[in-house]
Image: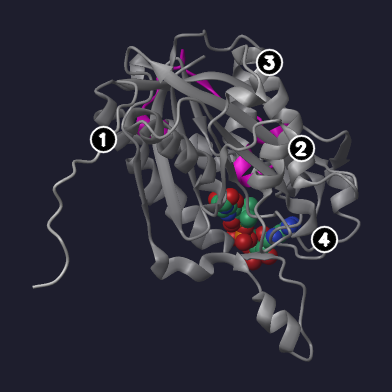
């Protein structure tokens, strides 16, 4: 026999009974890019892009504006609205697929910039589902007692990782950031997350090479995003709509109880199909800001959430269904009470 039997007892974790989104903020870079400008590099048209994807314009970050810069701007708004400072934050989760360093994380730099050091800091690699993954993790951290206030951020500079000459992706994506502060609550305000993955479709939306291939191959191409558009489209419509329905069931509510539906802004036709499949009544506000901002991957849900609240389309205290889905393939959905 080896080792000693444990006699000391570990202190149990004691978190808040529940968690809620306390505030939301977002940031969009100044430059607005039209479909005509995109069509200078691909054989397409404003009419095709609008009708097939819903995108009319997207924002583009300046060359010296980074994922961390945009995240910082969004977080400062969210912190101010929550009446908190960086020093009140215990953990920073940054969902991104475009932070251009393998290591260290965008979250570590962001945490320092916000004056939140020594908060825990980590990046989440869950593509367009990353923000909803983060909300779920923040909720569990607060309830488990490992954090009291968590910043969940989605920040993307997709213009660095999209090939402007790729007809399948060049028109779709935009840059921007969104953030929420998640904190303790006396009542349930973040419903159970329904999430998952299907790695058998790993190739459907991916970097077109790895960093190692980029280094070693003779005719290596920059690891921009590539997408089997129709495959991802069909998956989103047929496999992800039921996930949204399961999140409603898990929260114990009906579509008519929702004030807002805030899906990942992937394609306006996907949003329309989800609204139809969920049988959402017309009173439910549906986020459709893909038209102005394009698909901003991990940032799209918090940017759309901020907009729906800022424009008064859904009331504070109302219920919103959030859903993110993308490369992996991965997905996550939850019902939240609006801040
Ligand atoms: O954010 C993560 C999740 N991402 C998504 O959910 C995106 C899902 N996919 C999509 O949104 C759509 O697949 C796209 C918007 C990317 C593409 O739309 P689509 O209707 O699936 O186009 P398609 O690839 O099926 O192509 C249809 C037609 C083809 O022409 P023919 O063969 O019918 O004559 C293409 O050659 O449209 C043509 N086409 C284009 N035409 C003008 C493809 N891309 C373009 C283009 N401009 N950029």
Q: CA distance from mark 1 to mark 2?
A: 39 Å
Which quadrant of the structure image shows residue 191? Answer: top left
Q: Residue at x 34, y 28 (%)?
A: 143
Which residue is nearer to you in this view: 1 or 191? 1
On the question of residue 6 being in view, the answer is yes
The label shown at residue 11 is 1
Which residue occupies the foreground of this view, 137 or 330?
137
What label sits on residue 53 in the rendered view?
A: none
Q: Is residue 47 left or right of residue 178?
A: right
Task: For marks 3 and 4, give the one nearer the viewer.
Answer: 3
Which mark is first along the chain, 3 or 2? 2
Residue that carries the numbered disc 4 in the rendered image: 164
Q: Secondary structure at mark 4?
A: loop
What are the residue bounds of the magenta stretch? Answer: 276-299
Q: Are marks 1 and 3 in contact (CB under 8 Å)?
A: no
Q: Residue beneath label 3, please?
A: 80
The quarter holding residue 218 reads bottom right
Q: Is residue 154 magenta?
A: no
- The numbered mark at residue 70 is 2
State how far apart marks 1 and 4 are (Cα): 55 Å
Asked if marks 1 and 4 touch (Cβ < 8 Å), the reply is: no
* Residue 164 versus residue 63 in the image, above or below: below
Q: Is residue 27 visible?
A: no
Q: Secondary structure at mark 2?
A: helix
């Amino acid at each position: 026999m080896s080792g000693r039997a444990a006699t000391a007892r570990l202190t149990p974790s004691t978190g808040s009974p529940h968690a809620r989104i306390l505030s939301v903020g977002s940031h969009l870079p100044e430059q607005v890019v039209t479909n005509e400008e995109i069509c200078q590099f691909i054989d397409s048209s404003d009419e095709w892009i609008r009708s097939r994807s819903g995108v009319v314009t997207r924002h583009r970050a300046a060359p010296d504006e980074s994922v961390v810069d945009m995240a910082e701007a969004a977080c400062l708004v969210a912190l101010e609205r929550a009446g908190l400072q960086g020093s009140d934050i215990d953990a920073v989760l940054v969902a991104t697929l475009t932070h251009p360093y393998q290591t260290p994380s965008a979250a570590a730099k962001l945490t320092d910039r916000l004056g939140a050091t020594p908060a825990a800091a980590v990046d989440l690699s869950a593509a367009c589902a990353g923000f909803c993954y983060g909300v779920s993790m923040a909720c569990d951290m607060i309830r488990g007692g490992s954090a009291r206030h968590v910043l969940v951020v989605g920040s993307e500079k997709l213009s660095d990782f999209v090939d402007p000459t790729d007809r399948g992706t060049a028109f779709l994506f935009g840059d921007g950031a969104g953030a929420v502060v998640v904190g303790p609550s006396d009542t349930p305000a973040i419903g159970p997350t329904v999430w998952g993955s299907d790695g058998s479709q790993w190739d459907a939306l991916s970097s077109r090479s790895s960093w190692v291939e980029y280094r070693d191959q003779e005719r290596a191409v920059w690891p921009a995003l590539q997408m089997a558009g129709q495959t991802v489209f069909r998956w989103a419509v047929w496999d992800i709509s039921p996930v949204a329905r399961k999140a409603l069931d898990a929260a114990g509510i009906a579509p008519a109880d929702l004030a807002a539906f805030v899906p990942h802004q992937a394609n306006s036709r996907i949003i329309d199909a989800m609204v139809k499949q969920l049988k959402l009544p017309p009173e439910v506000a549906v986020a459709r800001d893909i038209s102005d901002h394009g698909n901003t991957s991990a940032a799209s849900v918090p940017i759309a959430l901020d907009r729906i609240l800022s424009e008064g389309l859904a009331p504070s205290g109302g219920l919103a269904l959030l859903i993110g889905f993308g490369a992996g393939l991965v997905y996550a959905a939850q019902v939240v009470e609006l801040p």
